[in-house]
Amino acid sequence: MPQQFAAESQDLAHQSSASAADYENWLRRIDEYVRWTQQAAVNMREGMRRGYTSPRVLIERMLPILERPWCG
């Protein structure tokens, strides 16, 4: 979802024919993304509470990737 969200924002920015409706739809998608990320955090906390976590080695490998600046 985060990669899709970023790609869609870049696509909209490059559209010279974007209409007011396109921007209104984009604002709706922003709200949906915020709700999605909030629910993801709730789900992760619940998983941690139940003992469901990703293997440490996997997370350690992902951290450098996630810390890199995004360039589209």
Image: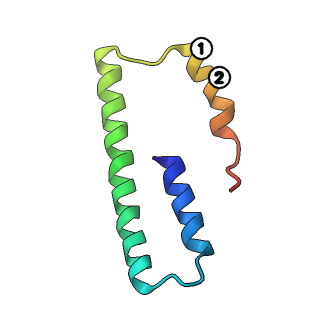
Residue 44 as seen in the image, left or right of residue 56 = left
For the C terminus, the image quarter is bottom right
For residue 11, above or below residue 49: below
- Circle 1 sits in a helix, a strand or a loop, which is it? helix
For residue 62, above or below residue 18: above
For residue 25, above or below residue 61: below
Q: Residues within 10 Å of mark 1 (few under 14, many from 20)?
A: few
Residue 66: x, y in percent?
Answer: 62, 37
Which one is in front, 41 or 61?
Answer: 61
Query: Mark 1 highlights which residue?
Result: 57
Q: Are marks 2 and 1 in contact (CB under 8 Å)?
A: yes
- Residue at image point 28% right, 16% down: 50
Q: Residues within 10 Å of mark 2 (few under 14, many from 20)?
A: few
Residue 45: x, y in percent?
Answer: 34, 29
- Residue at image point 37% right, 72% down: 25
Query: Which label number is shown at residue 19?
Result: none
- Circle 2 sits in a helix, a strand or a loop, which is it? helix
- Residue at image point 65% right, 22% down: 61
Instruction: Identify residue type, mark 2.
Output: Arg
Query: Mark 2 highlights which residue?
Result: 61
